[in-house]
Amino acid sequence: MSTRRDAVRQALTESTGFRSAQDLYADLRADGSKIGLTTVYRALQALSDSGQVDVLRTDDGEAVYRACDTESHHHHLVCRVCSTAVEIEGPAVERWAVEMGAKHGFTGVTHTLEVFGTCARCS
Amino acid sequence: MSTRRDAVRQALTESTGFRSAQDLYADLRADGSKIGLTTVYRALQALSDSGQVDVLRTDDGEAVYRACDTESHHHHLVCRVCSTAVEIEGPAVERWAVEMGAKHGFTGVTHTLEVFGTCARCS
DNA sequence: TCACATTTTGACAATCATTTTCGTTTTCGC
DNA sequence: GCGAAAACGAAAATGATTGTCAAAATGTGA
Ligand SMILES: [Zn+2]
Ligand SMILES: [Zn+2]
Ligand SMILES: [Zn+2]
Ligand SMILES: [Zn+2]
């Protein structure tokens, strides 16, 4: 892994919430890095492809990323205000999704699930 | 509701799956309508604002819409190939999301949840 | 250390869905 | 019919993301 990619991973790790490529680019430049926007996008692409970071879309379609503690399947409880996120699990939901798919004849079932709210600090 | 908006709603109703604004625009023009792309976007905006259609984002961030049978809260089982969707419900999931939010001090909890798979016909 | 192949980088241009603008057309109330 | 307000649509503007391509960094064997 190159130095640049590590810088992006690092910047992401320093945040508890989800950040966009543009956010990270601004952060890195503000810290004095000469990294280019294209490189930030490439690093995030590689990191998400290898499952090292999670991606989700904001309401307006912008992609935001997060370096989670675990790489195993999980979901997020995200603050609508500051975007801070908590990793959560729901075994029952996992089962429900698969059952629902089977019930309607769907195969290769997967799912996306995010919970939003306003965190204690932002309330 | 104007004639144009109705045309958009109609085009959406004729499909069992999710369609993008661009898709609907192409469909309508193909049917001989002189509708403009801007109007399609405005109609979809209004329809989703009033809760008459559901919206979700594809992996590449494009917004896709669907005129569902019910306006009450529900989720979708979507075919990855043809985008056909089935409306599904999961009372347990609804409770789980709220509990999870409360457990971490989040207020005003909502959630997004979509199940994907390959439908029987597309398998 | 040196020449050369390979990978990474970043400035800039190109895409493409979506939004804005703004002048024109319809619709509505009277 | 008439004027105000709402709806339209063509064209320009936005803004995130991707493609291009030459320069810079890195690795490798001699
Ligand atoms: Zn995560
Ligand atoms: Zn918060
Ligand atoms: Zn299908
Ligand atoms: Zn729900």
Image (cartoon, coloured by chain):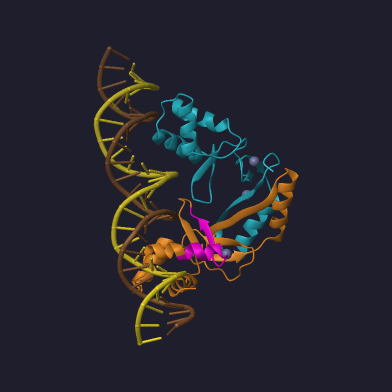
Chain colours: A orange, B cyan, C yellow, D brown
Residue at figure coordinates x 48%, y 64% from the top left: A44
Which range is magenta? A43-58
**Viewed as shown, does residue D24 lie left or right of B103?**
left
Which residue is nearer to you in this view: C28 or A53? A53
Residue at figure coordinates x 69%, y 56% from the top left: A93
**Viewed as shown, does residue B26 lie left or right of D6?**
right
Which residue is nearer to you in this view: B106 or D28? D28
Residue A84 visible? The answer is no
Does the magenta portion include A48? yes
Rendered location of residue C20, percent (x, y): 32, 43
Q: Is residue B48 above or below residue B112?
A: above
The quarter of the picture where residue C28 lies is top left
| Numbered disc total | 0
* Quadrant of picture, ligand 3: top right
Residue B99 visible? The answer is yes
Residue at figure coordinates x 47%, y 33% from the top left: B26
Does the magenta portion include B91? no
Q: Is residue D29 above or below residue B94?
A: below
Which residue is nearer to you in this view: A16 or A54? A54
Rendered location of residue C6, percent (x, y): 46, 69
**Viewed as shown, does residue D21 lie left or right of A11?**
left
**Viewed as shown, does residue C16 lie left or right of B57?**
left
Rendered location of residue D6, percent (x, y): 38, 30
The quarter of the picture where residue B103 lies is bottom right
Rendered location of residue A92, percent (x, y): 72, 58
